[in-house]
Amino acid sequence: MSALLDLYIKVETLETLLETVKKKAEKGLSVTISIEDESNDWGQNVSSYVSQSKEQREAKAKRFWVGNGKVFWTNGTIEKAVKNEKGEEKPYDNHKDDDLPF
């Protein structure tokens, strides 16, 4: 293990996430977590948002922020995950024609 972090998510955000996943008939959702080198004014260096497709990132689509937090332990090394050759990714469907937040 190379790091532990604490992430705080508001109840309202959890409810929005759950409602949206149910409306889209998804089994779950992917969240991107960013760890910064420096802390913000509130002592936080971790942020999270609903993951976006490459097309959404290139189009600068608005992110749906999930929560913030902080790293509270690290051994100084974080390794990049390596994908198993047998693993398959599920295609992303961005539901462009609905009014859901993500």
Image (cartoon, helix red, strand yellow):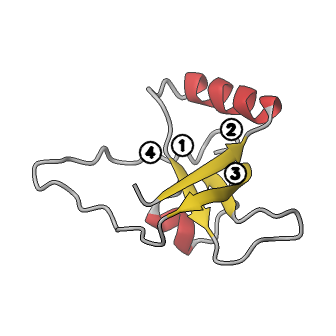
Q: Are marks 1 and 2 in contact (CB under 8 Å)?
A: yes
Q: Secondary structure at mark 2?
A: loop
Spot occupied by residue 92 in the image (x, y as percentages of width and height): 40, 48
State which tag comes first along the sequence, 3 or 4.
3
Most foreground residue, 50 or 38: 38
Spot occupied by residue 2 in the image (x, y as percentages of width and height): 43, 60
Q: Amino acid at mark 3?
A: Phe
Residue at coordinates 63% horizontally, 45% vertically from top-left? Answer: 102
Q: Are marks 1 and 4 in contact (CB under 8 Å)?
A: yes
Q: Name the disc covering residue 64, or none.
A: 3
Residue at coordinates 57% horizontally, 57% vertically from top-left? Answer: 33
Per the model, the C-alpha gap separating discs 1 and 4 is 6 Å
Residue at coordinates 68% horizontally, 46% vertically from top-left? Answer: 7
Q: Quadrant of residue 83?
A: bottom left
Per the model, the C-alpha gap separating discs 3 and 4 is 16 Å
Per the model, the C-alpha gap separating discs 1 and 2 is 8 Å
Residue at coordinates 44% horizontally, 45% vertically from top-left? Answer: 93
Q: Secondary structure at mark 3?
A: loop
Q: Quadrant of residue 56?
A: bottom right
State which tag comes first along the sequence, 3 or 2.
3
Q: Amino acid at mark 4?
A: Asp
Q: Amino acid at mark 2?
A: Leu
Q: Which residue is mark 4?
A: 93
Q: Secondary structure at mark 4?
A: loop
